Every structure is written in C-alpha cells, then in structure tokens.
Image (cartoon, rainbow, N blue to C red):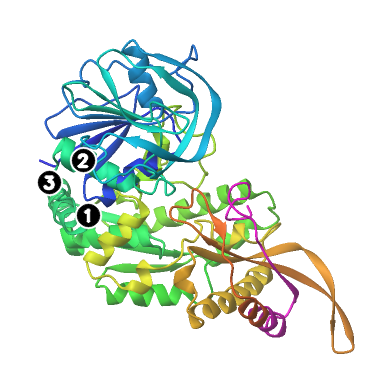
Amino acid sequence: MQETILILDFGSQYTQLIARRVRELNVYCEIHPFNNPPALTRDIKGVILSGSPYSTLQEDAPQFDLSEIKGKLPLLGVCYGAQYMALVGGGQVAPSEIREYGRANLSEVDPSSDLFQGVGAESQVWMSHGDTIMELPTDFEVIASTHDVRVAGYKVKDEATYGIQFHPEVYHSTDGARLLKNFLYDVVGVSGDWTPAHFVDETVAQLKAQLGNDKVVLGLSGGVDSSVAAMLLHKAIGANLYCIFVNNGLLRKDEFTQVLEQYEGMGLNVKGVDASDRFLDALAGIEEPEAKRKAIGHVFIEVFDDEAHMIEDVVWLAQGTIYPDIIESISVKGPSATIKSHHNVGGLPDFMKLKVVEPLKTLFKDEVRRVGASMDMSSELLGRHPFPGPGLAIRILGDITAEKVHILQEVDQIFINGLKTEGLYDQVWQAGCILLPVNSVGVMGDERTYEKVVALRAVESTDGMTADWVHLPYEFLAKVSNQIINKVKGVNRVVYDISSKPPATIEWE
C-alpha cells in the first residue's frame, strides 16, 4: 500500500508546486480538484488544502464539506484553505487593511508546535492574499504571527488540523520545506519511502500485470519523457514493445541519426521513419502558428498509423504523458482552453483503435529524469533541454521552407554546441534559436547584404511555468554571433532575447 498525501486543489497557481515539494521529501501525493475528490481509502494518510484565486467572501467561492476529513485525518490548509477552515468553523475573514503580498517575516512562533519545529521567529515567508483571518473559532489557537498578520498560522485544539496564511511551497519561504517536512513526518507520520527506484519496481510490476503478452507501440521523440517511458516498458515486456521514431524534418541538425544510434545502444526495438518531405509538403504556405501545429499533428498521426498497422496484433499505444498534463486536463475549471493542439492528453482519433498506457502519468518532469537516472540511462539523454513537439516549425516565424529549416538547423547547431563547449549547457533549462521573418541590411566586405535575422533564446526554470533569461557571458554571445554570421549563409544579424516568462513565453509561437 503506497502512502499518499491528498492535495485538494482550489485553483491556485501554486498547487503543482506543493505537490513537487511533497514529492521531493520522498512522499507520494496526488492532486485532485476540490469538487471531485477521490474516495478516502486507507492509503491516504493526510490532506493539504491549496490556495485559490478566489476570496472566501465571494458568493461563488469554492465550497467543500470537510466533515469526512477534519479531525479524522491530519489536515493542513494553505492560504485559502486556512481561511476557509477558519470561516466555516465560525471565525471571521475580512479584506486585509494592509496588502499581504510578497516577502514577510515571522515575528512570533509557538516553540511547542509540531508544525513549526526548527522554524524560528524572523523566518522569511511568502504571502499572497487579499483577505486575512480577523478572528479564529473558539477551538483554534494561534501558533505563528508576522509583524502585520496576527494569524499567520493556527492549530485546532485536540486535532492534527493546521492552517497557514503563507505559502511554504515557494522558494521565497526560506523554511517552507522544513515546515512541510514537519507536517508530513511529525504530524502525519509517513515513512517517506517513495523513491525513483521504488517507482521503477512498482511501475514495472504494474505494467507486467496490465499488459501481459500484449504488443505495445510507442512513438519516440528523442526527448526525456518518451525515452524513460520506453525503458520502463522495455523492462516490463521486452521485445513486445515496438518503438517508432518519426523524422518530421523539423528536428535539430543530424538529430534523427544520433538519436536512433542512442536508442539502439539502449537495447530498444526502434524503427526510424524519415517522413520529412510529407511534413514539409503539408506545411507549405502556412504561417499561422496553430495551423502549423494542426498540420504537423495530422501528418504525424497518418505516418504513425501507417507504421503501427505494419505491426501485427498490436493492442496498446504507449504515451509519455506526465503529471502536469493530467492535472491540466482535470483542473478545477475543467480542461484549459489553451491546451496546445499537439498535446497528447484527451484520447486518440477514432481510427486508431488502441488502448492507452501511460507509465509516467504520476510524475513531474524532474522526477522523470530521476527515474531515468535510477535505470542508468545516459546523462546526455536525461539532461537534454526540452524541445517543442512541432520542432523548428514554431521557431521559424512565418511560412516553412526547406531552405529556412536548413538555415535554422545550422544556426541552432552552432549555438547549442557552443553552450556545451563552454560548459554552459547544463546551466540552462532550455535554449534555442528563432528565425525571424525580417531581413536586415548588413555589410560583408565591400558588399551590402539584405539577409535574415536570428534570435538566440536561453532561459532558466524548474518546470517551464515561469522562466527568466540567462545572463550568458558577453564574450560567449559575441563569439557565437560571429560564428553564425560567418558560417551560415543567409544570416547577417544575431540578437539575444532577454524577456522573462511571464509576460513573454519561452517559445515565440
């Protein structure tokens, strides 16, 4: 029986971050919408209530019946969760007279509190709320305060029920990890045995039971998710796994050949399919980003389906879906309206009559890498930067031609190889180049040129939800820029993107 912490999501932007922090403490957890909670089985050892963009005072504020949880299971309310418990318990919540956003410092902490052991006064915490708890119910007691917020933390008497009006999951709460550890290990009493190796053993056993002697087909992308999914399946069913790696003509230079060689070295049964011309033909004349994605998705399905039909008696389609994809598809407000059209969540086209198996659907991206490392997969593969599903198509602004793809592949290779040579690659979460739909005047020798502009992009992040541009050394940028302009025919100007996400996105389309 896997010990599980249930996180009830009230729509906060930080809910996934709570889950990541719990997982980092070797404790398994699951996020479920507050309005669709799972049955409280014996494996659920504690519950965390998330924050929310709503105020508890709004008429349409999320409502949840706590009677089956409060006082029966260890319970921690964060921000909205804390305010909601106080309000329904008979306390008072009101709009705060002082804005409570950003950094704050604790001023008082109950030294006897299990939740705050090792968290001292003046510890920095991160606030993000417009309301505050003015009065607590009679059976609640204050266990932490800041200089401006009297009820920064509380406990219900004679219950393992706690509430905090700050966010321990964010980086800026300096002792946030310690507080969560206190809740998990000292209040809930978990054993903390959820590790990558444990996940591999458990998942392989589940896959063996689920798949038996059935044949499974998997579309490899060369990325971390599909590669780790393939290794788990390979451990479970061996030669019954059939992998297909499609070259859409929009990969990095020489990537198709290099990745195929890498997969063969891993012992996987992989077929490489070069469908470059089919994809480029389908993209001809298309400029709108979403139309590009749809065209690529349509051709991929056709190619993949053609290849899958060559495998006799295949029953399952394996996908590298990871937990953030699942969370978005079952969010509080329903599936996001902005889920990209090439996303693999949501099922299959009607003509692909295969059952779906998703070995990674409970993992975050960093956990996928740790699982891969526990199976001795190459650090080069596991350390690869994320690469968009539509490939270079969304890094070429405007229409796609073979010439433009060739130019961008050459530019990209110089940039990425430069990062690796200078020891900068692993300091960057994602890097790439964008071919802009503008020409600029240049001078080469005695001749004026009118050629393409490329933008270099390098960001640091943990999960891609937010990102900041990397302060690459000027000397490196100067060297790379010079190499690109001198070696790539058709480019005479290089710029560096210094936008953060938000408000910009990591990709340009």
**Depicted 342 relative to depicted 158: above or below:** below
Say left or right for 51 vs 295.
Answer: left
Q: Which residues are magenta?
A: 480-509
The verdict on residue 497 being magenta is yes
| Residue bearing mark 1 | 215
Q: Quadrant of residue 170?
A: top left
Which residue occupies the foreground of this view, 432 or 20?
A: 20
| Residue bearing mark 3 | 191
Amino acid under label 3?
Answer: Ser
Q: Nearer the viewer, mark 1 or mark 3?
A: 3
| Residue bearing mark 2 | 184
Q: Give the CA separation, mark 2 to mark 3.
A: 9 Å
- Judge the density around disc 3: few (<14), some (14-19), many (≥20) Cα neighbours within 10 Å: few
**Is the residue under label 1 in contact with that under label 2 (CB below 8 Å)?**
no
Q: Give the CA separation, mark 1 to mark 3.
A: 37 Å
Residue 316 seen from this side: no
Rendering coords of residue 495 (x, y %): 71, 68
Which residue occupies the foreground of this view, 300 or 105?
A: 105
- Judge the density around disc 2: few (<14), some (14-19), many (≥20) Cα neighbours within 10 Å: many
Say left or right for 119 vs 333.
Answer: left
Q: Compare marks 2 and 3 and give the one earlier in the sequence.
A: 2
Which residue is at a point 24% across and 31% down the rendered structure image? 47
Say left or right for 357 vs 400.
Answer: left
Q: Nearer the viewer, mark 2 or mark 1?
A: 2
